[in-house]
Amino acid sequence: MRIGHGYDVHRLVEGRDLILGGVKIEHTKGLLGHSDADVLLHAISDALLGAAALGDIGKLFPDSDEAYRGANSLMLLKAVVRRVENAGYRVGNIDATVIAQAPKLSPHVRTMRRNIANAVGCDIDAVSVKATTEEGLGFSGEGLGIAAHAVCLLEKA
């Protein structure tokens, strides 16, 4: 078994969609990034890559490559999973936390879990997504950005 950890953060700005876990969420701001800036899926991707010692998503999908401008992070996650599988592993489970003052994410968690499970090829019961605030503290508490942490377990295929 291999364990991986991933972290990502993006700034909130006006004029962008807010995409988390592959779900478009109504909000006054969205996340700034080269792709769709889905911090949750980016953290999960980095956790998977880290567990398999395959680098990080910045190396695989650099923001200097126009091919990834506006990229759907569910598609990027699927590409990560193919690399992990080619390295001889399969996903055992994923546990992730989104840190955001707003909006409330609980109505979207089940859909996020289903999207992630479908992308990585595991059962929804092997995917946990939680959301928390920082009670007004720090950049996420001030509504300046959103962060996500993820851990995963890979098993030999």
Image (tube, helix red, strand yellow):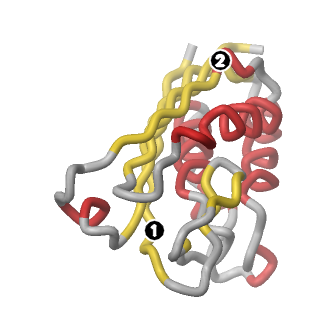
Q: Quadrant of residue 108?
A: top right
Q: Earlier in the sequence, mark 1 or mark 2?
A: 1
Q: Is residue 130 above or below residue 98?
A: above
**Residue 23, can we see it?**
yes
**Residue 31, can we see it?**
no
Where residue 65 appears, as percent x and y from the top left, is: 72, 80
| Amino acid on which disc 1 is placed | His
Where residue 32 appears, as percent x and y from the top left, is: 53, 77
Front-most of residues 62 and 134: 134
Q: Residue at x 66, y 32 (%)?
A: 110
Front-most of residues 16 and 55: 16
Q: Are marks 1 and 2 in contact (CB under 8 Å)?
A: no
Q: Residue at x 59, y 40 (%)?
A: 107
Q: Residue at x 41, y 55 (%)?
A: 147
Residue of label 2:
126
Label 1 to label 2, Cα distance in Å? 26 Å
The number of discs equals 2
Residue of label 1:
10
Secondary structure, mark 1, is strand
Q: Quadrant of residue 20?
A: bottom right
Q: Quadrant of residue 141?
A: bottom left
| 139 displayed left or right of 84 | left
